[in-house]
Image: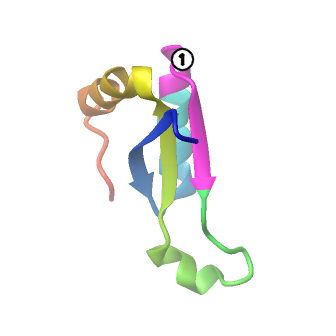
Amino acid sequence: MSDWKKIYQSTSIQNIMIIKGMLEEEDVDCRILNKQDSMYVQFNSFTPIELYVKSDDVVKAIRLIESKNIEEP
């Protein structure tokens, strides 16, 4: 995954999916790395889910996220 860069993280899968959908609408390819464990749901509030884009799309993706004023709750 050396060509991919982390641009966002959240403990909320809903936030990640909203941002992923927004970026994909703008033709930015995304990948999610979910390190949360479904067996230990009570501990997942501390484990971030990460969103990655290709190196060439980092600036575009960050600008899109900033333009939508998306913040972690």
Can you say whether 14 is above or below 43 in the image?
A: above
Question: Is 14 left, or right, of 68 in this rendering?
Answer: right
Q: In which quarter of the image is the N terminus?
A: top right
Residue 3 on image: x %, y %:
51, 33
Which residues fall within the magenta stretch? 23-33
The residue sitting at the top extreme is 27
User: Residue, x 55% and y 84% (percent of image)?
Assistant: 43
User: Residue, x 45% and y 76% (percent of image)?
Assistant: 46
Q: Which of 10 and 58 is in front in this view?
A: 58
Task: Give, as a three-letter code, the residue at label 1.
Answer: Glu
Question: Is 52 left, or right, of 1 in this rendering?
Answer: left
Q: Name the residue under label 1.
A: 25
Can you say whether 45 is above or below 69 in the image?
A: below
The residue sitting at the right extreme is 39
User: Residue, x 61% and y 58% (percent of image)?
Assistant: 34
User: Residue, x 52% and y 40% (percent of image)?
Assistant: 2
Q: In which quarter of the image is the C terminus?
A: bottom left
The answer to if 27 sits in the magenta stretch is yes
Question: Is 56 left, or right, of 34 in this rendering?
Answer: left
Residue 19 on image: x %, y %:
47, 36
Q: Which of 18 and 2 is in front in this view?
A: 2
